[in-house]
Amino acid sequence: MNIQKVYGVYFSPTGTTKSVTKYMLREFDIPKEEIDLTSYENRNNSYSFNEDELVIIGIPVYGGRVPITAKNRIKLLKGDNTPIVLVATYGAIHYSDVLHELQEIVKTNGFITIAAAAVVVEHNIINLCANVKIASGRPDTQELSTISNFTNQVYAKALESDSFENMVIKGKIPDSPRNKILIYFALPYGDKKCNKCNVCVKLCPVHAIDNPRKKAEQGCIRCLRCIKYCPQNARTFSKLMKIGVGLLLSIASQGKEKQSEFFL
């Protein structure tokens, strides 16, 4: 197939998924373009892709699922037998059946999955609990090399194929409530260091922050974007919540160290 252009599309509140997607995108020597689905202002934007274009779609894993906000925005992507590479980034605990779930979302919109990857990255908890480090420094140099090799194989597969068929990604979409754990988290707020610069208000993917010194509204998806990018480091959760979440995720991350997985 004569691939004319490659797109790196991502929903990435704290920038980690964006970094992985951009790292893959750089391996292509054809015209390329990034599409950021994170911004609230872009939430209703639709995009169309042809069969001679390739899309890399990256999302973070939230509670073993595709984030509902990402799902709604991905549904606005329209393919025309367009080959797509699925990328899920997760903090070394589990990615469950996310790749299967993501495939089901894009398949109904005209995309054909030709490859997929579950990439281990630093868990967002490092931006919340300073004493808890899960998958710190990942992906490391060796893992980045593996990602590059995988991307080159994807590129070769796309160029050598006359037509594409959906690869089989086993799994099921769970019946349990989405983000079951996250719904119990307290809402972030601005502490005494907040100077009302409103960076958090502008960056929130779901417009859940009205007053930066008050708690976010119930629409908050607990993505930690406001915490990571606050210039004053003023965004936080209650101390009790941080201790509880840190303990829970530390226990969940114990055992054999997770490795990234790639599917072609």
Image (cartoon, grey):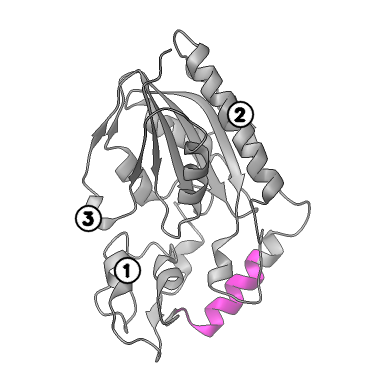
Q: Residues within 10 Å of mark 1 (few under 14, many from 20)?
A: few
On the image, the x and y values in percent for residue 231 come to 40, 77
Q: State the quadrant of the C terminus.
A: top right
What range of the chain is rendered magenta? 236-249
The answer to whether residue 58 is left or right of residue 263 is left
Q: Residue furthest front?
A: 29
Which is more N-terminal, label 1 or label 2? 1
Percent x, y of residue 179: 47, 55
Residue farthest to the bottom?
Answer: 192
Label 3 or label 1, whichever lies nearer to me, is 3
- Please name the amino acid that badge 2 sits on: Phe
* Residue 218 located left or right of residue 13: left
Q: Pointer 2: what residue?
A: 263
Residue topped by disc 3: 41
Query: Spatial distance from mark 3 to mark 1, Cα to Cα?
Result: 19 Å
Q: Main secondary structure of the magenta part?
A: helix
Counting residues from the start of the chain, the first of labels 2 and 3 encountered is: 3
Foreground residue, 257 or 154?
Answer: 154
**Whole-Å distance between the Cαs marked 2 and 1?**
37 Å
Give amino acid for label 3: Glu
Res. 171 visible in picture: no
What is the total number of numbered labels drawn onto the structure image?
Answer: 3
Question: What residue is disc 1 on?
Answer: 218
